[in-house]
Amino acid sequence: MFSPKASRFPVEGAKWVCCLLGLVLLAPMVQAQEPLLVDRIVAIVDEEAILQSDVDREVELYKLEKEYAGETISGSSQEVRREMLERLMESKLIIAAAKQADMVVDEEAIESSVQQKIDQFVEHFGSMETLELELGRSGMTLTDYRARMSTQLRDQQYLRLVVGRFIRPDLEVMDNEVRDYYLAHLDEMPADADSLTISNILVPVQPALSVRQAVQAKVETIQKGLAGGTSFDTMAMQHSEGPNANRGGAIGVVGPGDLFDPVLDQAVFALPVGQVSDPVISSRGVHLLLVNSIAADGKRALSQIFLPIEVSEADMKLAEVAISEARQRILDGESFARVAAEVSADPASAGQGGFLGTFSLEDLSTQFQDVLKDAEIGVVTEPLLTPAGWYVFQVNERVDGHMYTFDELKDNLRQVVEGEKIEVALAEYVEGLKERFFIDEKI
């Protein structure tokens, strides 16, 4: 919260996208044909060339980072390419200024950071082999990626050195500026949310018998293939209907509580490495799970074969009737705990009379927040349809949250205000560099 708009000139820990230096590559003469141009210069900054391939690789690296962070790419392909070229040119200007001032970066720290980043990617994708496949999809080898990350981190260090010497010393953040920022962004200030102690009843939406039989037949086919020696990733690519099927079912690295369904969480963390699970039924379908490796911190690199289970409107209606009848029993005087024990299919709470525990409101899903934020203690909520099925809730206890005061936030806010000032000052500084150094844009 209360973070300023992302800067084109990130200073601390940002993903400053930088370029590799290279030469225009010409294909060799074949018979009597003219040389074939396979790369071209798109800009020159202070006698340093930016190649078309630099921009291409920068775009692919940008996409890979976005995918790793689970973020979507905004803007058209042309807009992204233009942004990458502008970043490359601005970065070269800053590097030129840093070198002119005899600034030196820490090469050992850069290489250590590159290796750490690669290790994080290996953990995310499950193995070095999967990472190399992902890089290959982006037109890069591991060597390419290592070189570009080194360049990126090196140029990020140059940026910090330039800011530290030429920008930050001239900036001053006044107390009244920090308070003005707080008052102007009150609706963005963090707060401790209400905490709720809640109970629930879950009635899942069950698919028709014919649908379950069809899925069971697919599961048996997959299990026979695996028993016959076909690899898990091959079976996933052939049969899985999950979003990661084309990657052999590789999901990445998960920790306790990362998965959407507690049943999956329990199954994954009971599996040894290399063993395929029995079919696990979640609220979305059937999963065959494989733990590829276990890290020192206990996190699992996970793959799955997923078969969704489709439900009809009639299936949905049967479940809705069941949850409505359960709610009416409570309204007619039966205890919530008794009805939950008889009706609820929530494995985490049914055995405890529906009792779930105490949660911060903001830690609950958006759907649950909407239902519970104004729910009164002891009142049974209206039925709520979710991917897991139909829910009703009862709030047993509520503790009100509070808004953080200016004094609690002022140190963080001072950094935010300073960051905004640095962004403005750095943009002006780069404009000045354009007058000092030669720039020739070819497109």
Image (cartoon, grey):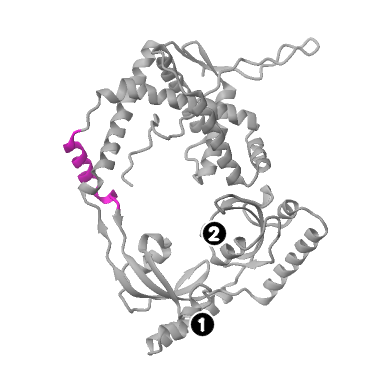
Labels 2 and 1 touching (C-beta < 8 A)? no
Residue at x 38% of width, y 23% of height: 161
Q: Quadrant of residue 423 in the image?
A: top left
In the displayed structure, does residue 340 sit left or right of residue 31? left
Q: Secondary structure at mark 2?
A: loop
Q: What is the three-letter code of the residue carrying label 1?
A: Val
Q: Is residue 26 left or right of residue 41?
A: right
Between residue 314 and residue 27, name the one nearer to us: 27
Label 2 to label 1: alpha-carbon separation: 25 Å
Q: Nearer the viewer, residue 395 or 391?
A: 395
Instruction: Determine which quarter of the picture holds residue 195.
Output: bottom left
* Numbered disc in front, either 2 or 1: 2
The magenta span reads 174-190
Q: Quadrant of residue 168?
A: top left
Q: Say whether residue 11 is visible.
A: yes
Does 401 sit left or right of 43 as displayed? left
Q: Which residue is mark 1?
A: 343
Q: Which residue sits at x=63%, y=36%?
A: 135
Question: Does the magenta run of residues contain 188?
Answer: yes
Q: Residue at x 25, y 26 (%)?
A: 171
- View extreme (front): residue: 296
Residue hosting label 2 = 259
Q: Which mark is residue 6?
A: none
On the image, the x and y values in percent for residue 267 come to 61, 64
Question: Which of pointers 2 and 1 lies earlier in the amino acid sequence?
Answer: 2
Q: Which residue is drawn at the image coordinates 41% and 20% (left, top)? A: 94
In the rendered structure, which amino acid carries the disc numbered 2?
Leu
Task: Where is residue 213? Give x, y as percent.
Answer: 71, 73
Residue 277 at x, y percent in the picture: 68, 63
Q: Residues within 10 Å of mark 1 (few under 14, many from 20)?
A: some
Classify 10 Å Cα crowding around label 2: few (below 14), some (14-19), many (20 and above): few
Q: Position of residue 28 (x, y in %)?
A: 74, 13
